[in-house]
Image (spheres, rainbow, N blue to C red):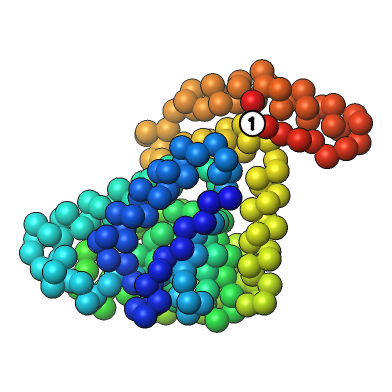
C-alpha cells in the first residue's frame, strides 16, 4: 500500500506549488512500483484533508498572470496523474476538504470521511477561475444541479450533505475510519492485480469525454487476465476452497 499524506497541518494542509509538484512525483513513483497495489491519500493533523490552496503563497506563486497559468498547469497535471494512475486510490478525509482538496478527492476512486468533515468549492468567494476538467469531474460524480449549487454558492457542506450529493462513499466515525480504510485497501490489494488493473483502465476510459473514449484500449488489459497464472490460481483456489494467492502475473 502506498500512503500519500498532505503535511501542512498549521495551515490545514493548504497546498503550495511545491506540494502539488511533490504529489505528482510521489504518485508517479507509486504507479511504477509493483509492490504498491493501492494508494491511500490523507491529511496530517486530523483537522483537514486539504483545505484548498495556500493563500499565504499567492503573492509569491500566483501574483502575475504568468505565475497563475504555471500554477494552474501544475495543479491540472497533478489531477491528471492522480486520475490516471493504474492503482486504485482512496481518499481518507478528516476535517476540511475544500477547493483544491475537493478536487483531489474527486480524482480518487473512493472517498471516505468522518462526521466532522466539511466540503466546499469557494472559488466564487475568492475570485478564482476554476478549470474545465475539475468541474466535469464534479458534475459526473454528483449531479448537474448539485454541481451548479456547489460552484455558484461557494457554500460549505456537512458530511451528511456530501453523502447525499454522492461526494463521498461513506461516513465513518473518527475512531473507525482508519481501520476501515486499511481493511478496504487490504481487500483490494489481496485481489487479483491484473483484474483490478483492467477494471481501473476501464474506469479511466469511461472518465474521458465520450468523443475521446476508445474501448479498444482496454482489451489488452482484459486479455492479459485470461492468459495469466493468477487466472489459474483463482480457479484452483475456488475449487480447493482456499484463499487465492495472487502474484500479478
Looking at the image, which is closer to me, 211 or 1? Answer: 1
Looking at the image, which is closer to me, 207 or 49? Answer: 49
Q: Is residue 65 left or right of residue 180?
A: left
Label 1 Cα crowd, 10 Å radius (few <14 / some 14-19 / many 20+): some
* Residue denoted by label 1: 248
Q: Is residue 109 left or right of residue 13?
A: right
Residue 141: percent from left, percent from top: 49, 56
Looking at the image, which is closer to me, 235 or 219? Answer: 235
Residue 143 visible: no
Q: In the rendered image, which quarter contains the C terminus?
A: top right
Image point (55%, 81%), residue name: 116
Residue 142: percent from left, percent from top: 49, 61
Residue 68: percent from left, percent from top: 15, 60
- 209 lies above or below 115: above
Image point (25%, 61%), residue name: 17
Q: Is residue 180 left or right of residue 20?
A: right
Q: Residue furthest right?
A: 240
Residue 149: percent from left, percent from top: 39, 71
Amino acid at each position: 500500500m502506498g500512503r500519500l499524506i498532505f503535511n501542512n497541518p498549521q495551515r490545514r494542509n493548504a497546498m503550495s506549488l511545491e506540494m502539488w509538484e511533490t504529489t505528482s512525483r510521489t504518485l508517479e513513483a507509486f504507479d511504477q512500483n509493483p509492490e504498491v497495489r493501492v494508494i491511500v491519500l490523507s491529511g496530517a493533523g486530523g483537522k483537514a484533508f486539504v483545505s484548498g490552496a495556500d493563500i499565504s503563497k499567492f503573492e509569491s506563486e500566483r501574483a502575475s498572470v504568468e505565475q497563475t497559468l504555471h500554477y494552474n498547469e501544475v495543479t491540472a497535471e497533478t489531477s491528471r496523474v492522480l486520475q490516471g494512475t493504474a492503482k486504485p486510490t482512496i481518499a481518507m478525509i478528516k476535517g476540511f476538504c475544500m477547493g483544491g482538496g475537493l478536487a483531489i478527492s474527486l480524482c480518487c476512486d473512493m472517498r471516505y470521511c468522518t462526521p466532522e468533515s466539511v466540503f466546499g468549492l469557494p472559488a466564487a468567494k475568492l475570485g478564482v477561475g476554476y478549470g474545465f476538467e475539475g468541474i466535469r469531474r464534479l458534475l459526473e460524480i454528483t449531479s448537474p444541479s448539485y454541481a451548479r449549487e456547489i460552484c455558484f454558492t461557494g457554500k460549505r457542506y456537512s458530511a451528511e450533505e456530501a453523502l447525499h450529493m454522492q461526494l463521498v462513499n461513506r461516513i465513518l466515525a473518527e475512531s473507525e475510519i482508519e481501520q476501515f480504510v486499511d481493511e478496504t485497501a487490504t481487500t483490494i490489494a489481496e485481489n487479483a492485480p491484473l483484474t483490478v488493473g483492467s477494471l481501473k483502465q476501464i474506469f479511466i476510459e469511461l472518465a474521458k469525454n465520450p468523443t475521446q473514449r476508445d474501448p479498444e484500449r482496454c482489451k489488452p488489459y482484459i486479455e492479459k487476465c485470461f492468459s495469466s497464472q493468477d487466472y489459474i490460481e483463482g480457479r484452483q483456489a475456488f475449487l480447493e476452497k482456499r484463499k487465492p494467492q495472487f502474484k500479478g502475473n
